[in-house]
Structure formats: structure tokens, C-alpha cells
Image (spheres, rainbow, N blue to C red):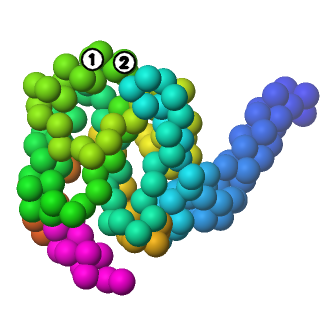
Amino acid sequence: MTRFLPLLLFLTLAAALAFALLGKPQRDIVNLSGSTMNEKLPVLHVANRDGKPQRIDTQGKVTLINFFASWCTPCVADHAEIRALASSFPALNLEGIAWNDTVSRVDEWLVQHRNPFGRVGFDTKGKAAIALGVRGMPESFLVDRHGMIRYHLPGPLTETVRSQTLEPLIQQLMEEK
């Protein structure tokens, strides 16, 4: 019997761990990831070019918040689609948030790739990214006039998603009061 004691102990611990990990309801796990669609946008503070705090203000405006970085390769393709949105929807409030980057590198990158943003903030400590549950670059959030997140896109915006999903939704949100 004592010969099987280590195996019995191991199986008991493995079963307890499996129960702890798999026994939690899925909604608890999802809520840990940050804001999702149809939730109120949390208050976001980022730094301006001078390092002073500024609040991302979306009230009364349809807003696309785009997290990007100058070192992010997929951000180049994403940025081209963001520029296309800016051309199609001049009234769309575009807020860029540079994550884990410097002002000088972001300025150079935006000159090279053309800046579509009304404002660019710097999330050097990652607080805004954490508040929204951002997991990688690029990542975008479409917010309606009432501050509700209406669309979340983890990863780069593609021409297909822009034309078939995002543009119709932006048009709908622009028409809403």
C-alpha cells in the first residue's frame, strides 16, 4: 500500500488542480480580461507629448481608439486601414494611443506613415491598456456617443473587416442620437 502512496497523492493533487481550473464559470474568466463590447469605456488617462496627463474624451463623439507602437510590424497594415477610415469618416474622432514607446520614435513613425489621429497619447506605464484588457498591438475599440464600447478588434484592421464590419457600424453610430 505504501508503494502506491506517492501515485495516490499525485492523482489527488492533479484532480484538485483540474477541478479548480475547470470548475470556474466561463464568465468569471472573461470578466478578468478587461472591457468588452457593450460595456462602458473606463476613464483612460495617457500622457501627452510633454508627459502631462490627459484624459481620453469620447463623450458625444463616435470614437475609434487605436493602440499602436512604432516597433509593431502589424501596426503598419493596420495604420493604412485607419487612414482609410479617416478619409471615409471625417467626423470620426480618432484617438491613437502609443503603447510602450517614445515620443521621438512615434513622431518619426507617424511622419513616415501619415498621422490620421486627432490626438496621440502615450501609455508608457500600460495603465490604459490594462484598463481595456489589451493583449497585443495593434488593438482598436469603437466607442459610441454615450461612451459604450460597441466594437473591439484585437489585432490589425484588414480591408475586409473595415469595409464589411466597421464602416457599416460607424455609419450606424454616426446616425444614432
Q: Main secondary structure of the magenta part?
A: helix
Q: Are marks 1 and 2 in contact (CB under 8 Å)?
A: yes
Looking at the image, residue 47 sits to the left or right of residue 62; the answer is right
What is the x, y in percent for residue 44? 53, 47
157 sits to left or right of 163: right
Three-letter amino acid code at the position of disc 2: Thr
Instruction: Count how many numbered circles sit on residues in the image.
Output: 2
Q: Callout 1: few (<14), some (14-19), or many (20+) C-alpha neighbours within 10 Å?
A: few
- Residue 175 falls within the magenta-colored stretch: yes
Image quadrant occupied by the C terminus: bottom left
The numbered dot on residue 105 is 1
In the image, the segment drawn in magenta is: 166-177
Q: Is residue 137 visible?
A: no
Image: 38 above or below 72:
below
Q: In the image shown, does 30 or 69 lie closer to the viewer? A: 69
Left-right relation of 120 to 158: right
Task: Give the residue at the far right of this rendering.
Answer: 2
* Quarter of the image with the N terminus in it: top right
Foreground of the two, 101 or 10: 101
- Which of the 4 image quadrants contains residue 80? top left
Residue ID for mark 2:
102
Q: Relative to 6, is 169 above or below?
A: below
Residue type at mark 1?
Arg
Residue 3 in percent (x, y) is at 84, 26
Q: Residue at x 21, y 63 (%)?
A: 91
Residue that appears at 11% across and 31% down: 113
**Relative depth, front residue between 83 and 26:** 83
Corner quadrant of residue 139: top left
Position in image of residue 49 (x %, y %) = 39, 26
Q: Is residue 51 above or below residue 177?
A: above
- Residue sitting at 78 percent across and 39 percent down? 13
